[in-house]
Amino acid sequence: MGSATVVAAGAVLGEGSCLADHVLVRETTVLRESVMIGPGGSVGRSTLIGTGTRIQNECLVAPWTVIDEDVLVGGRVTFIGDPTMGRRPEGQPAGGICVRRAAEFEPD
């Protein structure tokens, strides 16, 4: 775990996972085994990240996102799961993002 990294109470980190400097992992998030979060990354609450996934520097993963195993997310990629930014009708679920196994994301 790097310097200035914050892991909120209730988050679960799998064996062999690596968090670089200045990473934020929110509550109820689960990182499976051997997950890597690069410098400056932020993982929203209630997120599941699968075994062997690599998330590079300065990425933002929205709440309720599910990322399967062996996914590669390049630097500065942002996942936004709620395009209303919380301004949806009361009681309407935010949904979430689902990224399937071995997907690769690179910024333009």
Image: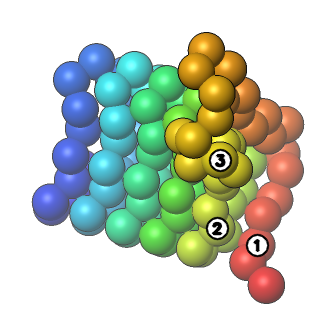
Looking at the rendered structure, the kind of residue marked 3 is: Thr
Gap in Å between the C-alphas at discs 1 and 3?
24 Å
Above or below 25: residue 64 = above
Above or below 41: residue 31 = above
The mark closer to the camera, 2 or 1, is 2
The mark closer to the camera, 1 or 3, is 3
User: Can residue 53 be seen in the rendering of this structure?
Assistant: no
Residue 8 screen position, x and y as percent: 23, 32
User: Can residue 100 be seen in the rendering of this structure?
Assistant: yes
**Residue 23, picture quadrant:** bottom left
Element assignment for label 3: loop
Q: Which residue is mark 2?
A: 77
Residue beneath the point at 64% across and 35% down: 88
Q: Which residue is mark 1?
A: 106
* Residues at discs 3 and 2 in contact (Cβ within 8 Å): no
* Residues at discs 2 and 1 in contact (Cβ within 8 Å): yes
The quadrant of the rendering that contains the C terminus is bottom right
Element assignment for label 2: loop
Residue 45 screen position, x and y as percent: 44, 31
Classify 10 Å Cα crowding around label 3: few (below 14), some (14-19), many (20 and above). Answer: few
Residue 33 screen position, x and y as percent: 51, 29
Looking at the rendered structure, the kind of residue marked 1 is: Glu
The tag earlier along the polypeptide, 3 or 2, is 2
Classify 10 Å Cα crowding around label 2: few (below 14), some (14-19), many (20 and above). Answer: some
Q: Nearer the viewer, residue 18 or 25?
A: 25
Q: Which residue is mark 3?
A: 84
Element assignment for label 1: loop
